[in-house]
Image (tube, rainbow, N blue to C red):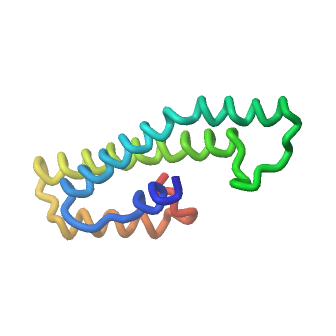
Amino acid sequence: LAALKKALSADHGELTDQLSAAQANAQELANLGNDLPSIEAAEKACDAANIEENDKTDHTYDDLWFAHNLLTKSYKRNVDLLTNQIQASKTEDISPEQVEEFKETFKHFDHDADDL
């Protein structure tokens, strides 16, 4: 999840390339979400066996579920934003420099850097 979160803020290249990368990462994130039920089952098994500490990770199922859902929403917004930017650049007289300026302005006001 950390690598996908970091990739969310990487915005190098053309908009179409960014969109393709965001869509691929969103699909990878969806695939990771398929592992959540088995993680929940493993946590419940540990709880049933009175195992309170896990030497492998500090993350709980709830932590992972929350982070996954938040990242999924962020990727959806990012894909929508990129799609809208591509559409706007095709239908309006907005230069790539203006699109970049809009993105920089948005990032300036995005104090917690979550792209929301």
How many numbered discs?
0
Q: In the image, what residue occupies the spot 37% across and 65% down?
A: 10
Image location of residue 110, percent across then percent down = 50, 62
Residue furthest out toward the front? 49
Q: Between residues 45 and 77, which one lies in front from this camera angle?
A: 45
- Apparent side of residue 50 relative to residue 32 in the rendered image (left or right): right
> What residue do we see at 18% from left, 46% from top?
87
Asked if residue 60 lies left or right of residue 72, the reply is: right
From the viewer's side, name the closer residue of 75 and 41.
41
Rendered residue at 44%/43% (across/down): 29
Left or right of 100: which side holds 54? right
Residue extending furthest toward the right:
50
Residue at point 52%, 58% (across, down): 2
Pick the residue in front: 116 or 20: 20
Q: Left or right: 33 with respect to 41?
A: left
Q: In the rendered view, would you say 1 is above or below 113? A: above
Q: Name the spot of residue 22 as percent of width and height, x first.
A: 32, 50
Tell me where residue 11 appears, x and y as whole percent: 32, 64
Q: Which quadrant holds residue 70? A: top right
Q: Where is residue 80 drawn, in percent x and y?
A: 33, 43
